[in-house]
């Protein structure tokens, strides 16, 4: 009986070790002048490909860059992440342009540098055939999809270029943060 209790206690003590935390740090700068961008919102999003990280230990949803454009996440679970950066007046990065990082246990990556480009704006007014404003019309900017070189003629496929907007009671809309 005591042997069974001893084996049970030994089994309880030998549990898989929790992965050791990792950290990520970097800087966000403006494309035109390479000046630091203070107040940019930086998120680490678990990637859909490869090993998925466990939950954040301290549940950080985002951090803001300091006056020198620097940011830091620590106490992260090892795994694969995408770095998402948002700042008013700047274009959001396309999924293909987002940096992906893979964190190993206790690894500290300090060179996650992100360059943001000023965003474009399209503003206008939606009217019906009689010239009356169309209220709550959904408007979205579209761009032609890039065709890899040597893969044939250009594609006519259109893809969204940023988030859409809804017209107001005057039929006016404003799309902002659009990529070049």
Image: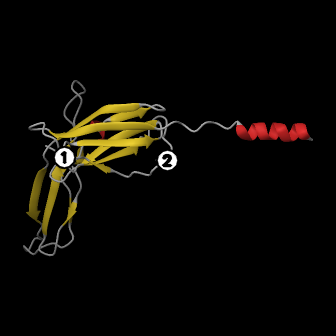
Residue at mark 2: 55
SS at circle 2? loop
Rendered residue at 47%/36% (across/down):
78
How many angstroms separate mark 1 from mark 2 (CA)? 29 Å
Q: Nearer the viewer, residue 34 or 84?
A: 34
Nearest to N terminus: mark 1 or mark 2? 2
SS at circle 1? loop
Residue 168 at x, y percent in the picture: 16, 72
Residue 67: image tag: 1
In the image, residue 106 above or below residue 83: above
**In the displayed structure, does residue 99 sit left or right of residue 120?**
right
Rendered residue at 24%/38% (across/down):
27
Q: Are marks 1 and 2 in contact (CB under 8 Å)?
A: no
Residue 107 at x, y percent in the picture: 43, 31
Residue 179: image tag: none
User: Coloured how?
Assistant: secondary structure
Where, quadrant-wise, is the N terminus in this rendering? top right
Q: Nearer the viewer, residue 117 or 107?
A: 107
Rendered residue at 38%/45% (across/down):
45
The number of callouts visible is 2
Q: Is residue 94 visible?
A: no
Q: Nearer the viewer, residue 8 or 122?
A: 8
Q: Is residue 22 visible?
A: yes
Badge 2 crowding class, 10 Å Cα cut-off, few under 14, some 14 to 19, many 20 or more, is few
Q: Nearer the viewer, residue 66 or 80?
A: 66
Q: Quadrant of residue 147?
A: top left
Mark 1 or 2: in front is 1
């Amino acid at each position: 009986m005591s042997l069974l209790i001893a084996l049970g206690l030994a089994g309880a003590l030998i549990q898989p070790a929790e992965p050791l935390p990792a950290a990520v740090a970097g800087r966000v700068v403006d494309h035109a002048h390479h000046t630091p961008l203070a107040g940019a919102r930086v998120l680490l999003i678990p990637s859909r490909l490869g090993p998925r990280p466990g939950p954040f230990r301290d549940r950080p949803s985002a951090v803001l860059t300091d006056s020198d454009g620097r940011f830091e996440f620590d106490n992260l679970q090892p795994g694969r992440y995408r770095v998402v950066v948002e700042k008013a007046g700047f274009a959001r990065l396309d999924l293909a342009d987002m940096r992906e990082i893979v964190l190993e246990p206790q690894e500290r990556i300090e060179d996650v540098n992100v360059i943001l480009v000023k965003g474009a704006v399209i503003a206008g007014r939606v009217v019906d055939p009689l010239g009356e404003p169309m209220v709550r019309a959904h408007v979205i900017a579209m761009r032609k999809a890039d065709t890899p070189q040597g893969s044939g003629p250009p594609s006519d496929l259109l893809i969204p270029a940023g988030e859409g907007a809804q017209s107001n009671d005057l039929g006016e809309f404003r799309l902002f943060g659009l990529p070049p």
